[in-house]
Image (tube, helix red, strand yellow):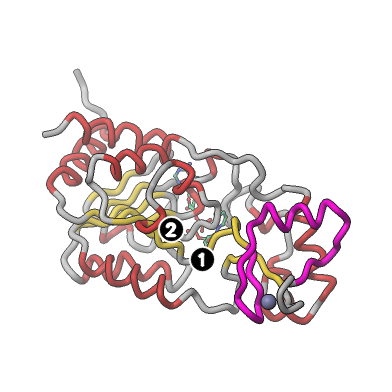
Amino acid sequence: MVINDLDAKVAAAAEMILASRRLVVFTGAGISTESGIPDFRGPGGIWTRFDPDDFTIQKFLSSRETRKKQWEILVKGELLSGVKPNRAHHAIAKLGRIGKLDCIITQNVDNLHQKAGNSPEKIFELHGNLQWIRCMDCGERYSVEHIMALLQGGVEVPECEKCHGILKPDAVFFGEMLPPDTLNAATDHSMRCDLFLVVGSSLVVHPAALMPAYAKEAGAKLIIVNIGDTPYDSRADILIEGKAGDVMSKMVEKVEKGP
Ligand code: NAD
Ligand code: ZN
Protein backbone atom coordinates (compact mmCIF):
# COMPACT_ATOMS: atom_id res chain seq x y z
CA MET A 1 0.00 0.00 0.00
CA VAL A 2 1.30 3.42 -0.89
CA ILE A 3 1.26 5.81 2.03
CA ASN A 4 0.56 9.23 0.66
CA ASP A 5 2.40 12.21 1.94
CA LEU A 6 -0.51 13.55 3.95
CA ASP A 7 -1.10 10.27 5.82
CA ALA A 8 2.60 9.96 6.60
CA LYS A 9 2.70 13.49 7.98
CA VAL A 10 -0.41 12.96 10.07
CA ALA A 11 1.09 9.76 11.49
CA ALA A 12 4.35 11.54 12.29
CA ALA A 13 2.41 14.33 14.01
CA ALA A 14 0.49 11.76 16.08
CA GLU A 15 3.77 10.20 17.18
CA MET A 16 5.08 13.59 18.18
CA ILE A 17 1.95 14.17 20.28
CA LEU A 18 2.35 10.78 21.96
CA ALA A 19 5.96 11.59 22.80
CA SER A 20 5.17 15.07 24.09
CA ARG A 21 4.79 15.99 27.75
CA ARG A 22 3.35 19.45 27.34
CA LEU A 23 1.28 20.07 24.25
CA VAL A 24 -0.11 23.52 23.49
CA VAL A 25 -2.72 23.78 20.73
CA PHE A 26 -3.01 27.22 19.12
CA THR A 27 -6.08 27.93 17.00
CA GLY A 28 -7.28 30.65 14.65
CA ALA A 29 -10.28 31.45 12.50
CA GLY A 30 -9.39 28.59 10.10
CA ILE A 31 -10.49 25.95 12.62
CA SER A 32 -14.01 27.39 12.62
CA THR A 33 -14.66 27.85 8.90
CA GLU A 34 -15.97 24.27 8.78
CA SER A 35 -18.52 25.35 11.42
CA GLY A 36 -19.72 27.98 8.98
CA ILE A 37 -17.93 31.01 10.47
CA PRO A 38 -16.00 32.91 7.81
CA ASP A 39 -12.35 33.69 8.49
CA PHE A 40 -10.96 37.19 8.11
CA ARG A 41 -8.91 37.08 5.01
CA GLY A 42 -10.29 34.30 2.83
CA PRO A 43 -12.90 34.71 0.06
CA GLY A 44 -16.25 35.47 1.68
CA GLY A 45 -14.26 36.52 4.76
CA ILE A 46 -15.66 38.94 7.27
CA TRP A 47 -14.08 42.02 5.71
CA THR A 48 -15.88 41.42 2.45
CA ARG A 49 -19.15 42.05 4.33
CA PHE A 50 -18.33 44.46 7.12
CA ASP A 51 -16.25 47.59 7.37
CA PRO A 52 -13.15 46.96 9.51
CA ASP A 53 -13.25 50.61 10.51
CA ASP A 54 -16.39 49.93 12.54
CA PHE A 55 -14.44 47.50 14.67
CA THR A 56 -11.89 49.98 15.94
CA ILE A 57 -12.27 50.85 19.60
CA GLN A 58 -12.04 54.57 18.84
CA LYS A 59 -15.01 54.48 16.48
CA PHE A 60 -17.02 52.22 18.76
CA LEU A 61 -16.55 54.55 21.72
CA SER A 62 -17.08 57.80 19.86
CA SER A 63 -20.03 56.95 17.65
CA ARG A 64 -23.44 55.86 18.85
CA GLU A 65 -24.26 55.13 15.20
CA THR A 66 -21.39 52.60 15.01
CA ARG A 67 -22.55 50.95 18.21
CA LYS A 68 -26.08 50.74 16.86
CA LYS A 69 -24.79 49.09 13.69
CA GLN A 70 -22.86 46.52 15.71
CA TRP A 71 -25.83 45.61 17.84
CA GLU A 72 -27.88 45.22 14.67
CA ILE A 73 -25.33 42.73 13.35
CA LEU A 74 -25.51 40.88 16.65
CA VAL A 75 -29.27 40.77 16.83
CA LYS A 76 -29.58 39.57 13.26
CA GLY A 77 -27.34 36.74 14.39
CA GLU A 78 -25.23 37.07 11.31
CA LEU A 79 -22.00 36.23 13.03
CA LEU A 80 -22.37 33.36 15.43
CA SER A 81 -25.94 32.18 15.74
CA GLY A 82 -26.38 28.46 16.25
CA VAL A 83 -22.80 27.55 15.34
CA LYS A 84 -21.55 24.18 16.47
CA PRO A 85 -18.06 22.79 17.01
CA ASN A 86 -16.75 20.71 14.11
CA ARG A 87 -14.53 17.64 13.90
CA ALA A 88 -11.39 19.64 14.59
CA HIS A 89 -12.77 21.11 17.83
CA HIS A 90 -14.00 17.66 18.89
CA ALA A 91 -10.62 16.09 18.15
CA ILE A 92 -8.88 18.69 20.32
CA ALA A 93 -11.45 18.13 23.08
CA LYS A 94 -10.55 14.46 22.94
CA LEU A 95 -6.87 15.30 23.45
CA GLY A 96 -7.98 17.04 26.63
CA ARG A 97 -10.00 14.05 27.82
CA ILE A 98 -7.14 11.59 27.31
CA GLY A 99 -4.73 13.85 29.19
CA LYS A 100 -2.62 14.88 26.21
CA LEU A 101 -3.26 18.61 26.34
CA ASP A 102 -1.57 21.29 28.42
CA CYS A 103 -3.84 24.06 27.13
CA ILE A 104 -5.48 25.73 24.16
CA ILE A 105 -4.49 29.24 23.12
CA THR A 106 -7.05 30.65 20.73
CA GLN A 107 -7.54 33.80 18.73
CA ASN A 108 -11.16 32.89 18.17
CA VAL A 109 -14.06 34.56 19.90
CA ASP A 110 -16.65 31.92 18.99
CA ASN A 111 -16.73 29.83 22.19
CA LEU A 112 -16.48 26.61 20.17
CA HIS A 113 -13.68 25.00 22.19
CA GLN A 114 -15.85 25.31 25.29
CA LYS A 115 -18.85 23.93 23.41
CA ALA A 116 -16.73 20.97 22.31
CA GLY A 117 -16.06 20.17 25.97
CA ASN A 118 -12.61 21.55 26.76
CA SER A 119 -12.43 22.90 30.29
CA PRO A 120 -12.62 26.70 30.30
CA GLU A 121 -9.64 27.12 32.65
CA LYS A 122 -7.44 25.48 30.02
CA ILE A 123 -8.54 27.81 27.22
CA PHE A 124 -6.74 31.12 26.85
CA GLU A 125 -8.74 33.44 24.63
CA LEU A 126 -6.37 36.12 23.41
CA HIS A 127 -9.10 38.07 21.66
CA GLY A 128 -11.97 37.57 24.07
CA ASN A 129 -15.29 35.81 23.59
CA LEU A 130 -18.50 37.02 21.99
CA GLN A 131 -20.57 35.07 24.51
CA TRP A 132 -20.12 38.00 26.84
CA ILE A 133 -20.87 41.70 26.79
CA ARG A 134 -18.92 43.99 29.09
CA CYS A 135 -19.43 47.47 30.50
CA MET A 136 -16.55 49.71 29.48
CA ASP A 137 -16.92 51.75 32.66
CA CYS A 138 -17.52 49.41 35.60
CA GLY A 139 -16.53 46.08 34.03
CA GLU A 140 -19.86 44.36 34.74
CA ARG A 141 -20.35 41.35 32.45
CA TYR A 142 -23.63 40.29 30.80
CA SER A 143 -24.42 37.16 28.83
CA VAL A 144 -25.11 37.65 25.15
CA GLU A 145 -28.57 36.11 25.67
CA HIS A 146 -29.45 38.78 28.21
CA ILE A 147 -28.49 41.59 25.84
CA MET A 148 -30.16 39.86 22.89
CA ALA A 149 -33.45 39.89 24.79
CA LEU A 150 -33.13 43.68 25.24
CA LEU A 151 -32.33 44.18 21.56
CA GLN A 152 -35.21 42.01 20.49
CA GLY A 153 -37.42 44.05 22.79
CA GLY A 154 -36.58 47.18 20.81
CA VAL A 155 -33.58 48.67 22.63
CA GLU A 156 -31.23 50.05 19.96
CA VAL A 157 -28.10 50.64 22.00
CA PRO A 158 -28.18 48.86 25.34
CA GLU A 159 -26.34 50.37 28.29
CA CYS A 160 -25.00 49.05 31.59
CA GLU A 161 -27.79 48.35 34.07
CA LYS A 162 -25.53 49.28 36.97
CA CYS A 163 -23.83 52.47 35.81
CA HIS A 164 -25.30 53.35 32.39
CA GLY A 165 -21.84 52.90 30.87
CA ILE A 166 -21.15 51.86 27.29
CA LEU A 167 -21.56 48.14 26.66
CA LYS A 168 -19.28 46.38 24.24
CA PRO A 169 -19.00 42.79 23.04
CA ASP A 170 -16.17 41.24 25.07
CA ALA A 171 -13.92 40.70 22.09
CA VAL A 172 -10.74 42.64 21.42
CA PHE A 173 -11.31 45.38 18.85
CA PHE A 174 -8.65 46.97 16.68
CA GLY A 175 -6.67 49.46 18.73
CA GLU A 176 -7.50 47.68 21.99
CA MET A 177 -5.06 45.91 24.28
CA LEU A 178 -5.24 42.17 24.70
CA PRO A 179 -6.37 41.07 28.17
CA PRO A 180 -3.02 41.18 30.00
CA ASP A 181 -3.54 38.18 32.31
CA THR A 182 -4.54 35.97 29.40
CA LEU A 183 -1.64 37.18 27.29
CA ASN A 184 0.81 36.51 30.13
CA ALA A 185 -0.56 33.04 30.77
CA ALA A 186 -0.48 32.18 27.05
CA THR A 187 3.10 33.42 26.77
CA ASP A 188 4.08 31.38 29.79
CA HIS A 189 2.49 28.17 28.48
CA SER A 190 4.08 28.72 25.05
CA MET A 191 7.51 29.07 26.61
CA ARG A 192 7.09 25.96 28.74
CA CYS A 193 5.61 23.54 26.20
CA ASP A 194 7.58 20.92 24.30
CA LEU A 195 5.15 20.72 21.37
CA PHE A 196 3.19 23.58 19.81
CA LEU A 197 0.43 22.68 17.38
CA VAL A 198 -1.09 25.41 15.20
CA VAL A 199 -4.52 24.74 13.67
CA GLY A 200 -6.08 27.16 11.18
CA SER A 201 -4.20 30.40 11.60
CA SER A 202 -2.40 32.60 9.11
CA LEU A 203 -0.07 33.57 12.02
CA VAL A 204 0.10 37.20 11.01
CA VAL A 205 -1.93 38.89 13.75
CA HIS A 206 0.31 40.16 16.55
CA PRO A 207 0.95 39.68 19.41
CA ALA A 208 -0.91 36.34 19.12
CA ALA A 209 1.42 35.21 16.35
CA LEU A 210 4.41 35.55 18.68
CA MET A 211 3.35 32.44 20.59
CA PRO A 212 4.90 29.92 18.15
CA ALA A 213 8.12 31.95 18.22
CA TYR A 214 8.24 31.77 22.03
CA ALA A 215 7.72 28.00 21.84
CA LYS A 216 10.37 27.46 19.16
CA GLU A 217 12.89 29.65 20.95
CA ALA A 218 12.40 27.60 24.10
CA GLY A 219 13.12 24.40 22.16
CA ALA A 220 9.63 23.07 21.45
CA LYS A 221 8.70 21.28 18.25
CA LEU A 222 6.21 22.98 15.93
CA ILE A 223 3.41 21.40 13.89
CA ILE A 224 1.29 23.59 11.59
CA VAL A 225 -2.05 22.46 10.16
CA ASN A 226 -3.35 25.15 7.83
CA ILE A 227 -4.62 25.87 4.35
CA GLY A 228 -2.29 28.46 2.91
CA ASP A 229 1.10 29.83 3.89
CA THR A 230 2.20 31.22 7.22
CA PRO A 231 5.39 33.11 8.06
CA TYR A 232 6.41 30.14 10.25
CA ASP A 233 6.25 27.43 7.58
CA SER A 234 10.02 27.14 7.22
CA ARG A 235 10.39 26.70 11.00
CA ALA A 236 7.77 23.95 11.29
CA ASP A 237 8.93 20.44 12.12
CA ILE A 238 5.81 19.14 10.39
CA LEU A 239 3.77 21.27 7.99
CA ILE A 240 0.39 19.89 6.98
CA GLU A 241 -1.60 21.66 4.30
CA GLY A 242 -5.14 20.42 4.74
CA LYS A 243 -8.58 20.96 6.19
CA ALA A 244 -8.52 21.18 9.96
CA GLY A 245 -11.51 18.85 10.49
CA ASP A 246 -10.08 16.13 8.33
CA VAL A 247 -6.51 16.33 9.50
CA MET A 248 -7.21 16.71 13.22
CA SER A 249 -9.72 13.87 13.41
CA LYS A 250 -7.25 11.52 11.70
CA MET A 251 -4.38 12.71 13.86
CA VAL A 252 -6.23 12.25 17.15
CA GLU A 253 -7.55 8.84 16.08
CA LYS A 254 -3.94 7.76 15.71
CA VAL A 255 -3.01 9.27 19.08
CA GLU A 256 -5.83 7.29 20.72
CA LYS A 257 -4.54 4.05 19.24
CA GLY A 258 -1.22 4.69 20.98
CA PRO A 259 2.34 4.04 19.84
P1 NAD B 1 -7.01 34.37 9.52
O1 NAD B 1 -8.32 34.61 8.86
O2 NAD B 1 -5.94 35.38 9.38
O3 NAD B 1 -6.39 32.97 9.03
C1 NAD B 1 -7.11 31.79 8.96
C2 NAD B 1 -6.26 30.76 8.22
O4 NAD B 1 -6.95 29.51 8.23
C3 NAD B 1 -6.00 31.13 6.76
O5 NAD B 1 -4.65 30.88 6.45
C4 NAD B 1 -6.95 30.17 6.01
O6 NAD B 1 -6.49 29.84 4.73
C5 NAD B 1 -6.94 28.97 6.91
N1 NAD B 1 -8.10 28.10 6.82
C6 NAD B 1 -9.38 28.43 6.47
N2 NAD B 1 -10.17 27.36 6.55
C7 NAD B 1 -9.39 26.32 6.95
C8 NAD B 1 -9.65 24.94 7.23
N3 NAD B 1 -10.87 24.40 7.07
N4 NAD B 1 -8.62 24.17 7.63
C9 NAD B 1 -7.37 24.69 7.78
N5 NAD B 1 -7.08 25.98 7.53
C10 NAD B 1 -8.08 26.79 7.13
O7 NAD B 1 -7.35 34.09 11.04
P2 NAD B 1 -6.45 34.16 12.35
O8 NAD B 1 -5.07 33.69 12.08
O9 NAD B 1 -7.26 33.55 13.42
O10 NAD B 1 -6.31 35.71 12.66
C11 NAD B 1 -7.28 36.68 12.36
C12 NAD B 1 -8.17 37.17 13.47
O11 NAD B 1 -9.45 36.71 13.18
C13 NAD B 1 -7.99 36.73 14.86
O12 NAD B 1 -7.68 37.89 15.55
C14 NAD B 1 -9.36 36.22 15.34
O13 NAD B 1 -9.66 36.84 16.57
C15 NAD B 1 -10.30 36.70 14.33
N6 NAD B 1 -11.46 35.90 13.87
C16 NAD B 1 -12.04 34.96 14.68
C17 NAD B 1 -13.09 34.20 14.17
C18 NAD B 1 -13.73 33.17 15.07
O14 NAD B 1 -13.82 33.38 16.29
N7 NAD B 1 -14.16 32.03 14.54
C19 NAD B 1 -13.54 34.36 12.88
C20 NAD B 1 -12.91 35.34 12.08
C21 NAD B 1 -11.87 36.11 12.60
ZN1 ZN C 1 -21.28 49.60 34.16
| Label ID, residue 127 | 1
Earlier-in-chain disc, 1 versus 2 = 2
Disc 1: residue Cβ within 8 A of ligand 1's nearest atom: yes
- Is the residue under label 2 in contact with that under label 1 (CB below 8 Å)? yes
Residue extent of the magenta highlight: 133-159
What is the secondary structure assignment of the residue under circle 1? loop
Q: Is residue 240 above or below residue 75?
A: above
Q: Is residue 243 above or below residue 144?
A: above
Disc 2: residue Cβ within 8 A of ligand 1's nearest atom: yes
What is the secondary structure assignment of the residue under circle 2? strand
Is residue 39 found inside the magenta-colored segment of the image?
no
Residue lying at 31% horizontally and 64% vertically, measured from the top left: 212
Question: Measured from the top left, where is residue 195 in percent x and y?
Answer: 21, 56
Question: Which of 203 and 157 lies nearest the eye of the viewer?
Answer: 157
| Label ID, residue 106 | 2
Question: Measured from the top left, where is residue 228 in percent x and y?
Answer: 44, 50
Q: Looking at the rendering, in which quadrant would you find the N terminus?
A: top left
Question: Measured from the top left, where is residue 89 in percent x and y?
Answer: 42, 42
